[in-house]
Image: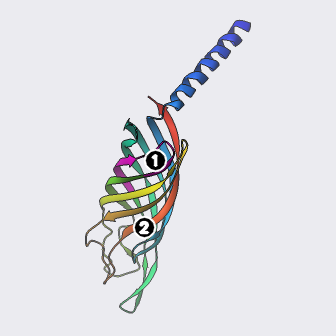
């Protein structure tokens, strides 16, 4: 039994050393975060969401990876042509390439996510509206961000936009999937 305890202790020490060595090398990491923002359009009022991304520092200072998550956009009431319209809430799931530039190990950074934003939720743009247009399926996804980073955390401000064209317009109000906001992400090192 004493030998088993010594083996377990040795394995624990080795595993701790291996994990420390991996965390010292921040080339590969998983980023998990939350964000919120104010809408940039007439059909929504605000958004909140969760982000998950994988990033690899191909060369020092430049990150490349993939990003996804979920953002909930909250519909608002609007009077159009003398009628009160209640826009539906909807979700947006991005599938994007992640590009980042880190000028220093600690400090400010900038980047962008580019890809496709899938719109999920109700089929119609507005509630209780006759002949309400269908909600678009999605479009080109664009999310530039700037922020501050340290070893464990990223704090950022961002602009999020999904370009849906003219689909989903009600009267003169275009269907908008856009917001300006802020967020935070935690970096989980994955080693070399």
Looking at the rendered image, the quarter that the N terminus falls into is: top right
Where residue 33 sits: x, y (%)?
51, 51
The quarter in which the C terminus is drawn is: top left
Q: For this rendering, which residue is in front, 75 or 49?
A: 49
Point out residue 126 in the picture as x, y percentages from the top left corner: 39, 76
The reply, left or right, for residue 158 in relation to residue 140 is right
| Structural distance between the alpha carbons of marks 1 and 2 | 18 Å
Q: Residues within 10 Å of mark 1 (few under 14, many from 20)?
A: some
Q: Which mark is residue 66?
A: none
> Is the stretch drawn in magenta largely helix, strand or loop?
strand
Q: Residues within 10 Å of mark 2 (few under 14, many from 20)?
A: many
Residue drawn 46% across the image and 81% down it: 77
Q: Nearer the viewer, residue 125 or 19?
A: 19
121 lies left or right of 23: left
Q: At x 43% / y 72%, what residue is drawn? A: 88
- Magenta-span inclusion, residue 94: yes
- Residue bounds of the magenta highlight: 93-109
Residue 101 locus on image (x, y percent): 39, 47
Q: Single out the residue that lies furthest toward the right.
A: 2
Secondary structure of the residue carrying tag 1 is strand
Q: Is residue 48 visible?
A: no
Residue most toward the bottom? 82
- Dots 1 and 2: beta carbons under 8 Å? no
Label ID, residue 179: 2
Nearer-N-terminus badge (1/2): 1
Look at mark 1 in the image and give the residue it sits on: 52
**Circle 2 sits in a helix, a strand or a loop, which is it?**
strand
181 and 49: which is toward the camera: 181
The residue lying toward the viewer, choosing from 74 and 59, is 59
Q: Is residue 51 above or below residue 81?
A: above
């Amino acid at each position: 039994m004493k030998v088993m305890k010594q083996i377990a202790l040795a394995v624990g020490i080795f595993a701790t050393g291996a994990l420390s060595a991996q965390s010292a090398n921040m080339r590969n990491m998983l980023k998990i975060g939350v964000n919120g923002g104010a809408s940039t359009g007439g059909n929504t009022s605000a958004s909140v969401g969760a982000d998950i991304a994988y990033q690899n520092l191909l060369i020092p200072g430049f990150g490349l990876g993939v990003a996804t998550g979920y953002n909930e956009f909250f519909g608002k009431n609007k009077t159009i042509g003398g009628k009160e319209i209640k826009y539906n809430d909807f979700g947006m799931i991005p599938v994007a390439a992640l590009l980042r530039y880190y000028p220093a190990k600690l400090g400010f950074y900038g980047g962008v996510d580019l890809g496709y934003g899938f719109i999920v939720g109700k089929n119609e743009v507005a509630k209780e509206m006759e002949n309400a247009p269908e909600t678009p399926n999605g479009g080109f996804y664009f999310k530039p961000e700037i922020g501050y980073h340290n070893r464990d955390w990223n704090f950022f401000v961002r602009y999020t936009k999904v370009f849906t064209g003219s689909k989903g317009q009600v009267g003169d109000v275009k269907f908008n999937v856009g917001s300006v906001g802020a967020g935070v992400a935690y970096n989980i090192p994955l080693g070399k």
